Amino acid sequence: MKQTHIRRTEITIETRSLTIIRSRNVKSGCVRCQNCQTLTAAFTPAHAVLIFRVDAAEIKRLFQINQIHFADDSALCGKSLADYFKQEIRYVED
């Protein structure tokens, strides 16, 4: 009998996403996140909804299960958002 050899090829593709955010009339600089102690941009939940194209309920759910966190009393930590959504964020002021 003739033996048949099956060959298997595995291909891994890594992708990277970059989000550049330009804004006007925003205080310059970053904030020190109280949670992860990194210097990062901070985003309101409303801005996070627009930037990452998810609804407000999803942002709330991610916060509740500790996937993202607040940098201060009113703004989400840009690092936790970038880590969760696997994106690099560059924040540029006009």
Image (cartoon, rainbow, N blue to C red):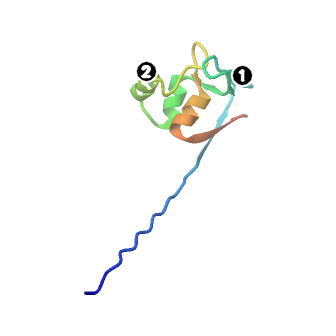
Above/below status of 23 relative to 35: below
Q: Identify the residue at horizontal 67%, vertical 21% (top origin).
A: 37
**Nearer the observer, disc 1 or disc 2?**
2
The answer to which quarter of the image holds residue 6 is bottom left
Q: Amino acid at mark 1?
A: Lys
Q: Amino acid at mark 2?
A: Gln
Q: Which residue is mark 2?
A: 64
Above/below status of 11 relative to 5: above
Q: Identify the residue at horizontal 62%, vertical 41% (top origin).
A: 88
Q: Position of residue 19 (x, y in %)?
A: 60, 42
Q: Identify the residue at horizontal 54%, vertical 28% (top origin).
A: 47
- First-in-chain label (1 vs 2): 1
Mark 1 burial class by Cα count in 10 Å: few <14, some 14-19, many 20+: few
Q: Nearer the viewer, residue 19 or 34?
A: 34
Which residue is at the far left? Answer: 1
Q: Position of residue 45 (x, y in %)?
A: 51, 24
- The kind of secondary structure element at disc 1 is loop
Q: Which residue is mark 1?
A: 27
Q: Position of residue 79 (x, y in %)?
A: 61, 31
